[in-house]
Image: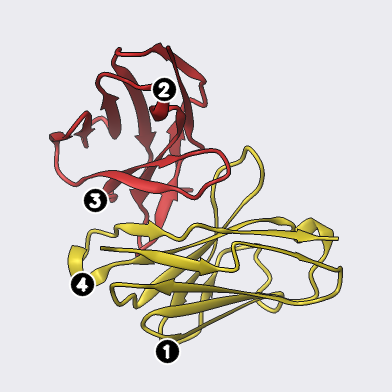
């Protein structure tokens, strides 16, 4: 149980284009999902908390107009990187909280990640 | 600023030995703690969670929590080369978020 998928697993795009990344909880409902970014040899950086049916909560310093998050259902959250630039190249990882199984204990299960390269 | 501190390593242990990974956290309000394993180029995988003081064992892994000292540890018994990875410690940080440490790189050599 507690499987999270992400699509695509990797993407290469030209500077100025937009890229959409999907995060799905496959065997549980996730009212809350999280989006992280990780640069090489660095730790995870939380970008935003995605709440089903409401606006995402962004961490300080993360541009909400550049990183659009939509959590339209209990099993799907999407991150769209708009007008991507080479400095946006990174490993983007989503996680989901299995509220039904773990209650208030905050366990997060991660997707396999999406490696974005902006040329 | 809520923080989780870990020694970056690398921690090098011989195969079959016990690997001991440690972490401290700053927020006394944290109630739940997690250890994630991350192989190079992959996403983190949850391996242990602990919520109350004391030890929690799962196979070769034992998590230890001391809330008074704000200290969490992970012991890996009979370490194998396949355990070589970066281990991330995380503490609950409010609003359902987790605060991650920078990770400790473990190298198990044959």
Circle on res. B81: 2
Colour of chain A, in one word, is yellow
Pick the front one: B50 or B46: B46
In the image, which is nearer the foreground, mark 1 or mark 4? 4
Q: Residue at x 39, y 48 (%)?
A: B45
> How many neighbours does mark 4 have within 10 angstroms: few (below 14), some (14-19), or many (20 or more)?
few
- The answer to whether residue A46 shows anywhere in this view is yes
Circles 2 and 1 in contact, beta carbons < 8 Å = no
Quadrant of residue B76 within the rendered picture:
top left
Colour of chain B, in one word, is red
Residue that label 3 marks: B31
Instruction: Locate the C terminus of chain A and report the quarter of the image it occupies.
Output: bottom right
Residue B59 is situated, as x and y percent measured from the top left of the image, at: 17, 33
**Secondary-structure class at tag 1:** loop
Residue that label 1 marks: A53
In the image, which is nearer the foreground, mark 3 or mark 2? 2
Disc nearer the start of the sequence (3/2) = 3
Q: Are marks 2 and 1 on the same chain?
A: no
In the image, which is nearer the foreground, mark 1 or mark 3? 1
**Secondary-structure class at tag 3:** loop
Image coloring type: by chain
Q: Residue at x 32, y 20 (%)?
A: B79
Please indicate whether residue A41 sits to the left or right of residue B91 in the image: right
Disc nearer the start of the sequence (1/4) = 1
Label 3: chain? Answer: B
Quadrant of residue B88 within the rendered picture:
top left
Q: Are marks 4 and 2 on the same chain?
A: no
**Secondary-structure class at tag 4:** helix
In the image, which is nearer the foreground, mark 4 or mark 2? 2
Pick the front one: B18 or B97: B18
What's the CA distance linking mark 1 and mark 4? 18 Å
Residue that label 4 marks: A100
């Amino acid at each position: 149980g507690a499987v999270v998928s992400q699509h695509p697993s990797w993407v290469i795009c030209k500077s100025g284009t937009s890229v959409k990344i999907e995060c799905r909880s496959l065997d549980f409902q996730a009212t809350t999902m999280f989006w992280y970014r990780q640069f090489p040899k660095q730790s995870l950086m939380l970008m935003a908390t995605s709440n089903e049916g409401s606006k995402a909560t962004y961490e300080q310093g993360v541009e909400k107009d550049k990183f659009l998050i939509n959590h339209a259902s209990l099993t799907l959250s999407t991150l769209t990187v708009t007008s991507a630039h080479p400095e946006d190249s990174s490993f983007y990882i989503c996680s989901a909280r299995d509220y039904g199984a773990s209650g208030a204990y905050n366990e997060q299960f991660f997707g396999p990640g999406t490696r974005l390269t902006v040329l | 600023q809520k923080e989780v501190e870990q020694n970056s390593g690398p921690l090098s242990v011989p195969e079959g030995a016990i690997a001991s990974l440690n972490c401290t956290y700053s927020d006394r309000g944290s109630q739940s703690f997690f250890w994630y394993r991350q192989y190079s180029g992959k996403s983190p995988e949850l391996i242990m969670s602990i919520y109350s003081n004391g030890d929690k064992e799962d196979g070769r892994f034992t998590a230890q929590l001391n809330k008074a000292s704000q200290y969490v540890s992970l012991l890996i018994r009979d370490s194998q080369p396949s355990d070589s990875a970066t281990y991330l410690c995380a503490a609950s940080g409010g609003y359902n978020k987790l605060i991650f440490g920078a990770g400790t790189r473990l190298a198990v050599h044959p």
